[in-house]
Image (cartoon, rainbow, N blue to C red):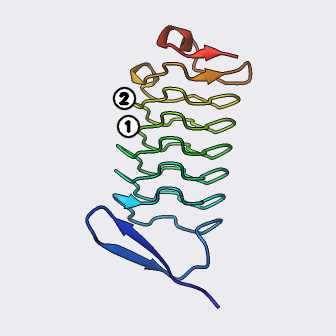
Amino acid sequence: MSSIITINFVSNDSIELNIDSLEAANLNDLNLHRAILNNQSLKRANLSRTNLRGAQLKNTNLSQAILTSALLMTSDLEFANLESCDLTKANLAAANLKGSNLSKATLKETDVWSVDFTDANLAGAVMLCKRISDAVFTNAVYDENTIWPESFNPLLLGAIKV
């Protein structure tokens, strides 16, 4: 027997989902524009092609989530756990990822224009992103396993190799 989970939006609207948990939930192709999901666990959730534009995802656990081709423009992912998640072809333009854990995450062909990665953990991440030179990397940490585009030097943008 399934439960009902209610997701609220900044606009005071809400959506009810007939699921037991947001963890490992199939939420692909949903319109969650400006959803309030702070402090939630969406671990292993499928959010492919989901519209999360302007969503509030502070301190949210998105580890191992599938976010391929998701729309995350202007979303607030401060201190979110995105470890080992797949952000291939996602649009993160102008998103806030301050202090987020992106270790072992995949960001292939991901648009990171004006993304704030300040203090983020990028250890082991695949950072083969679009418009990467326009992102902020102040005090973001990475290691020898982090993959960057050829001729991109994260040190010049304030990242720290550990």
> Between 3 and 92, which is closer to the camera in this rendering?
3
Hey, which quadrant is residue 149 in on the image? top right
For disc 2, the neighbor class at 10 Å (few under 14, some 14 to 19, many from 20) is: some
Q: Residue furthest bottom?
A: 1
Q: Is residue 121 left or right of residue 29?
A: right
For disc 1, the neighbor class at 10 Å (few under 14, some 14 to 19, many from 20) is: many
* Quadrant (top left/top right/bottom left/bottom right) for the N terminus: bottom right
Report x, y in % for residue 52: 41, 55
Q: Note whether 36 is above or below 121 in the view shown.
A: below
State the SS at label 1: loop
Q: Earlier in the sequence, mark 2 or mark 1?
A: 1
Give the residue at x 50% y 8%. Answer: 156
Residue placed under numbered mark 1 in the picture: 93
> Between 34 and 98, which is closer to the camera in this rendering?
98
Give the Cα distance between marks 2 and 1: 6 Å
Hey, which quadrant is residue 6 in on the image? bottom left
Report x, y in % for residue 153: 55, 11
Report x, y in % for residue 85: 63, 46
Hey, which quadrant is residue 108 in on the image? top right
Q: Is residue 155 left or right of residue 143?
A: left
* Quadrant (top left/top right/bottom left/bottom right) for the C terminus: top right
Q: Note whether 11 is above or below 56 in the view shown.
A: below
Say which amino acid is labelled 1.
Ala
> Between 31 and 42, which is closer to the camera in this rendering?
42
Say which amino acid is labelled 2.
Ser
Give the residue at x 55% y 37%. Answer: 100
Residue placed under numbered mark 2 in the picture: 114
> Between 151 and 99, which is closer to the camera in this rendering?
99
